[in-house]
Amino acid sequence: MLLFFVANGVFVFVGGPASAQQVYPGWKMTEKAEQEAKNAKTVSSALQAGTIDAQLFDPYFKTYYFHRWTQPRNIDSLNTYVRKDFLSTDLDKATGPARDYLLKTSLQALEKMRSNPAVSPAVRYNAVLALGLLYADSGKTTLYAPALPILIDEYNNPAASQANQLGALVGIVRYAQLGIEDQALRENVVPQLLEKITTQKKPPQGITEDVHNLFFRVRALEGLAGLARTVGPKKEFVDLFLTVIQDGEEPDELRYLAAKALAEINYAIAAEAGANLNVDQIANAIIKLAKYACEGEQKFIDELLRSEQVKSSSGAGQLSGSRGFGAGSTDNSKIEQSITRNKFAFGSIQEAIKGFGAIRSETNLLTALNKAGTPETKRDAIILEKMLKLIDDHFRYLNNGPGAAEEKKSSGSRSGSGRAAAAAGPKTFKVTLQNIAEGLLDLDFKIDELLEETAPVDEAPKAEEAGEAAEPAGQGADIDF
């Protein structure tokens, strides 16, 4: 069993029973190699200057620097070696030919390390993570192209651990988001791999459903969203996002993330490329997802309230004062959880409508709907634009509470020191769980009202076909047009 956590964007291996039961000797280090530690400052200066000194670099990097990662006695320093010394210091500051040297040398070392049976799973895992963080430039805008095929090979390796596969996927997704140099990898290999993972509902053997959905499938979907930006708004990407959004059996997080992925679609470029996107279908999927979010988050709150009532009735976990659940619940952790879920769900829906980027008003779904120019798409645009404002109102309600307007009127007499003292205390919220549920019910009702007021009016010929008068008797029936 592998245990890992995220630290500054890097998944770091902590440990696990498997590593405790077996001894991993690591790579052999000679006494002479150990002495290379004294050259650390000189090497660092040379890296920053961009100059290559083979007599200095070769023994330091090829017999000491990466070898020390693998030593059993250094397991507690692994995070420091990988994240601080290598990624944040030496590679981050290396320039010119010296950077090229370090990239090539580190690639060779990490590729050997990722599956070497002599080193612990912790080291192998961190080697894979480091492969996904090799930037070709110090500005961290371009990833080192030769590392991507190794990451793909590691993910597809049936002998790779679950942790290594996840680490490889994290790196692959990063390439998808920043750009892939090789055309075959960019156009075929990576999109097909990410699509396969995203659409694979049944987890592979040895992986739990939660891990598969919340780690592997979520990451893969993020990668496809990145490709929609770096490769282009292909119809197959949009179709996959819509499939996930419209599938009621998918996890909520995945459905909302698919909506967020639609924000990466540049509809202007898609139109120029002849992608033939069905913007009416996209709009309707988003509207239905908003309705689902209203109902789903209400159910989530109901479950929280029900579980706490069971605890209270059994005498377990009962707290004094207003800490109990109900209309006056102030259980901060659960309120925060509900607010976070609300903001992720409806924030993703807003992004699907508005899009990303500085020029998004020219390329987003609203503009595409209006440009399509049909009565249906114009109606969709009106609904989505008004729905954006309804969601903004809902967010203000979550932040300020149901009595925000009245409180604002009477807040002028309060002293500044009193407000500062309140801000310095424990985190509190201006809504209860019951308030959030009521806010969701109100949002759901207003979306329904919006749909009704923008619904197409039945045309007169439909009534005439049924053998009924188009106008009530005596009200214009004798008017000759």
Image (tube, rainbow, N blue to C red):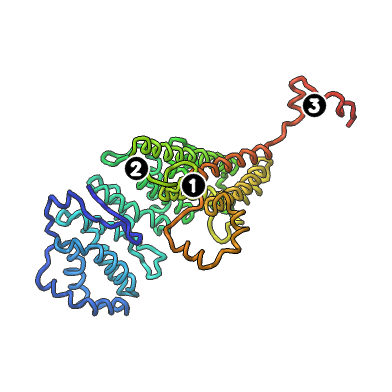
Residue at the farthest left position:
31
Query: Which residue appears at 30% of the width and 67% of the height?
Result: 87
Q: Is residue 162 left or right of residue 406?
A: left
Q: Amino acid at mark 1?
A: Thr
Q: Quadrant of the C terminus?
A: top right
- Mark sitting on residue 317: 2
Image location of residue 402, percent across then percent down: 57, 49
Q: Secondary structure at mark 1?
A: loop
Along the polypeptide, which appears first: circle 3 or circle 2?
2
- Mark sitting on residue 287: none
Q: Nearer the viewer, residue 423 or 211?
A: 423
Along the polypeptide, which appears first: circle 1 or circle 2?
2
Query: Which residue appears at 13% of the width and 75% of the height?
Result: 35
Q: Amino acid at mark 2?
A: Gly
> Quadrant of residue 10 in the image?
bottom left
Q: Amino acid at mark 3?
A: Ala
Q: Secondary structure at mark 3?
A: loop
Along the polypeptide, which appears first: circle 3 or circle 1?
1
Q: Is residue 104 above or below residue 42?
A: above
Tell me the residue that label 3 is attached to: 470
Q: Nearer the viewer, residue 110 or 380?
A: 380
- Mark sitting on residue 432: 1
Query: Which residue appears at 59% of the width and 44% of the height?
Result: 279
Q: CA–CA distance between discs 3 and 1?
A: 51 Å
Q: Is residue 233 visible?
A: no
Query: Which residue appears at 36% of the width and 54% of the height?
Result: 172
Q: Determine whether label 3 and label 2 are within 8 Å by CB.
A: no
Residue at the farthest front position:
321
Q: Determine whether label 1 and label 2 are within 8 Å by CB.
A: no
Image location of residue 257, percent across then percent down: 46, 47
Q: CA–CA distance between discs 1 and 2?
A: 19 Å
Image location of residue 464, percent across then percent down: 77, 24
